[in-house]
Image (cartoon, grey):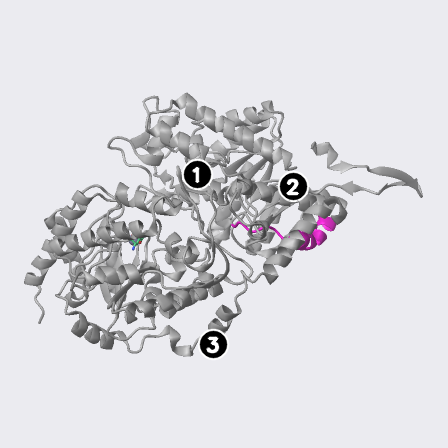
Amino acid sequence: MKMEHFLKNTKAEESHGCIIAQETTIMVVAHNLGFPRIGANRELKKAQESFWAGTISEAELIEVGRELRAKHWALQKNAGIAFAPVGDFAFYDHVLNVTALVGAVPPRHANASGSTADLKTYFSMARGDAGVPAQDMTKWFDTNYHYIVPEFADTTKFAIADESLFAQVSEALAAGLRPKPVLVGPFTYLYLGKEKSAGFARLSLLPALLEVYAAILDRLTLLGVEWVQLDEPALALDLTADKLELFASAYARLAKHGPKKLLATYFGDVSDHAALLKSLPVDGIHIDVVRAPAQLDSFLVDLPSTKVLSVGVVDGRNIWRNDIRASVALLQKASSSLGERLWVAPSCSLLHTPVDLANETKLDAEFRSWLAFSTQKLAEVSAIATALTSGEAAVASQLAESDAAVASRKSSVRVNNPEVRARIAQLPANSDARQSPYPVRAKAQAARLQLPRFPTTTIGSFPQTAEIRKARADFKKGTIPEALYVEKMKAEISLVVERQEAYGIDVFVHGEAERNDMVEYFGEQLAGFAFTENGWVQSYGSRCVKPPVIFGDVSRPKPMTVDWTTYAQSLTKKPMKGMLTGPVTVLQWSFVRVDIPRSETCLQLAVALRDEVADLEKAGIAVIQIDEPAIREGLPLRRKDYDAYLEWATRCFRVNASPVRDDTQIHTHMCYSEFNDILPAIAAMDADVITIETSRSDMELLTGFGTFAYPNDIGPGVYDIHSPRLPNLAEMLQLLEKAVAVIPAERLWVNPDCGLKTRKWPETENALTTMVAAARELRVKYPAA
Ligand code: GLN
Ligand code: ZN
């Protein structure tokens, strides 16, 4: 499709002496913000890992990248997408691509030539290199994608240092496509970075960075690029007026450079900035109306007649089929007022959805009809644009399919479970509270459990050996009978119990050998969940995840962990912890239905897991841990929305945890993030004990717990399970002394940072023996009164 065809069949007719346009067919543009780079069969992952392992050459890796781009561009073109996005491809991460492009390579990674960011430098920044630590990685907004955090210092200099973007533009042009380069915008790029020198603000680098962006844009013009997309998702965050001013100044600076600019916002409502965005010297604005449907109107009013409005109406963050009729209706007004200046798109880059539903061979027809992966989403975008251009009749079959899917989902008995709804509606008011406050419970638990001071425990998983993984895989494939599988798991449990006995641990775990993944394990046993074969999305680098799909009302057909836990308990006199994944974490790491609020699905999960807690207690289990490592990840992007989220998230946890007696001890576990800013919410969860990851931050995290005066028991991690390095006794004692300084000794536990499944047995043995020795020293130094 050529640009000049957007406006076609314009017949002019003479009337009263002036020319009037008549019967104008105006074409609404279908375009895409970015396509997943991993490949339908995770070709990129395989190539990256082979390259890192030295089994393929750099040239071979580069060739895999070229093939993937060519394939994805062709696929987009065939779907009726107007441009070929370029720059969405990355050998690790698209933010790191910008770091290479603008030459913001930290000195420790700089290569011999100094001026170019070659692939070796690139991977050194991403993954570290002999003795050179990698750059940090953190979550891309509220997605499960992680980007490499750019590092800035007062010495940072920018210059074009990588030619890949330009080469890929040429590649697309050579293939006869219309490339639309996609770049993280200068403001978001700096904003998401971190400062490596003191007394310096990274945004002060903006003028220097803009010089390079201007040069990049000029080069794109020279290559013949018509449009460039600059992604500024930072606009969906809380920004102070001075930041917004800087943001605006950036686009003023770039005004005279480059091709037409589409400024893309996503992940949230930017209507507060509508006036500003409309006034910027850019040629188009993209808004996300999946996350923030109400903002459409703010952009329709007074949109300058020279600007395009790109409306993200197909969900780029989820796997549900679009309701095409509803999307067309939503855009009708925009279409009649904007005509060809209306572009239709996914809400954000499709990076966050799996590649192609065609790769799913095992889904039943009904469930499958409810889904759309990236490839299908492009067809949806295209169908919506066509319907707006030529009327609904032009997409009659797509509309019929979409209507049928909407109707079948609405009425399906697999989605709607009246019993679950009734139970939620009738949940007693006190179901989110324990019987007594913590101090009363603590006494009852002390009497029942008889634990020493500084009790030692672990977080749940023990090393997952090749044999365990094989047994699970064989059982799943059906190549070993259930009885043999159970026998193998029980053997593992008894080994784990024996070893904890030998190390001298106080509160045991069964080791989680039966679990492949802490969310999948529960999802597979709960109603309302489905699993895909190939629904992979990139988490970071070569790591991909395959999130479960929560499509319907959630319920628990039968107990999920009770047999394993009671078997483990039967082998020891020490308390055995029941081990569950909490409702918020299950929600956070799944693709969640959008026909009811997330909070409601979370509550359904909480109620299902609540029954498991009750059953564990009934079976004699005295300590139950409910992991919520993802609770902080669920935080909304804007502060004003924090409270509402934390309110329902913590309530769901309490609903999960509260059916038990006072003398049953509830633990929770958190890791992966800073918790200091949500401490009141963590306290509101009212777990008897919280274990947290702290050893890497040198107990920094704990200072917050001290200052806030966290009221219940705490187990700060003393062993960084992410590192093969083993801490010695002195180091552990030093960490614990820091903890004793802020947490009363009688409320302190001793444990690793997280589960041990990625470690090997010899390290585990060493670390846990040292950990028990540390606890014993503390007991001598700080005896109970
Ligand atoms: N119980 C889990 C384990 O030990 C916790 C994992 C996590 O926090 N991510 O593996
Ligand atoms: Zn953890």
Q: How far is the residue under mark 2 from the one under mark 3?
A: 46 Å
Mark 2 touches mark 3? (CB < 8 Å): no
Q: Relative to the observer, which residue lies in front, 238 or 91?
A: 91
The label on residue 95 is 1
Q: Please tell me whether mark 1 sits on a helix, a strand or a loop.
A: helix
Secondary structure mostly seen in the magenta stretch: helix
Q: In which quarter of the image is residue 153?
A: top left
**Disc 3 target residue:** 426
Residue at image position (64%, 58%) is 407
The magenta region covers 318-338
> Which comes before the other along the chain, label 2 or label 3?
2
The residue where tag 2 is placed is 30
Q: In the rendered structure, which disc, 2 or 1, sits on the residue that comes first in sequence?
A: 2
Q: Which residue lies furthest to the left in this view?
A: 780
Whether residue 425 appears in magenta in the rendering, the answer is no
Position of residue 495 measured from the top left corner of the image (x, y, whole percent): 19, 51
Tag of residue 21 = none
Q: Position of residue 164 (x, y in %)?
A: 47, 27
Residue type at tag 3: Gln
Percent position of residue 745, x then y: 15, 65
Question: Viewer-nearest of labels 2 and 1?
Answer: 2
Drawn side of residue 604 relative to residue 264, left or right: left
- Verify CB contact (< 8 Å) between mark 1 and mark 3: no
Q: Which amino acid does label 2 sit on?
A: Ala
- The C terminus - image quarter: bottom left
